[in-house]
């Protein structure tokens, strides 16, 4: 599984109007990696230290919790 390209994420974040870094990461992964499934996004995140920290900070421990978080915080 490829690593998250944090330099591209930072560039993507500069143009985002959202404030939640995890939601920005989800949007970035949808755009940059063409991944739309919350379960696949969770798999990527759990393999990356920074992304895992973003998940843990919000108490997200599985893909279903990430899916619920995405649903609640996106419109």
Image: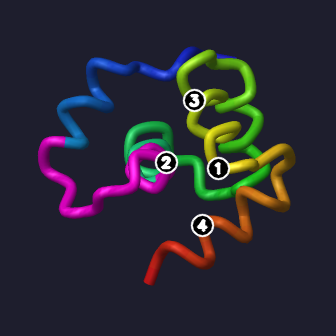
- Dot 1, crowdedness within 10 Å: few (<14), some or many (≥20)? few
Counting residues from the N terminus, which is met first, the one under dot 2 or under dot 1?
Answer: 2
Query: Is residue 15 within the magenta segment?
Result: yes
Counting residues from the N terminus, which is met first, the one under dot 4 or under dot 1?
Answer: 1
Secondary structure beneath dot 2 equals: helix
Q: Are marks 2 and 1 in contact (CB under 8 Å)?
A: yes
Q: Which residue is mark 3?
A: 51
Q: Which residue is mark 4?
A: 70
State which mark lies toward you, 4 or 1.
1
Q: Are marks 2 and 3 in contact (CB under 8 Å)?
A: no
Q: Are marks 4 and 3 in contact (CB under 8 Å)?
A: no
Horizontally, is 12 left or right of 26 in the view?
left
| Residue at (32% x, 31% y) in the render | 9
**Quarter of the picture holding the C terminus:** bottom left
Q: Position of residue 54 (x, y in %)?
A: 57, 37
Q: Which residue is mark 2?
A: 22
Residue span colored magenta: 14-26
- Dot 2, crowdedness within 10 Å: few (<14), some or many (≥20)? many
Q: Are marks 1 and 3 in contact (CB under 8 Å)?
A: no
Counting residues from the N terminus, which is met first, the one under dot 1 or under dot 3?
Answer: 3
| Residue at (28% x, 18% y) in the render | 7
Secondary structure beneath dot 1 equals: loop
Q: Residue 13 or 2: which is nearer the viewer?
A: 13
Q: Which mark is residue 58?
A: 1
């Amino acid at each position: 599984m490829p690593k998250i390209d944090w330099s591209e994420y930072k560039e993507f974040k500069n143009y985002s109007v959202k404030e939640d870094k995890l939601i920005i990461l989800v949007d970035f992964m949808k755009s940059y990696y063409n991944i739309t499934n919350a379960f696949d996004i969770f798999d990527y995140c759990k393999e990356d230290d920074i992304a895992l920290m973003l998940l843990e900070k919000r108490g997200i421990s599985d893909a279903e919790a990430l899916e619920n978080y995405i649903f609640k915080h996106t419109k």
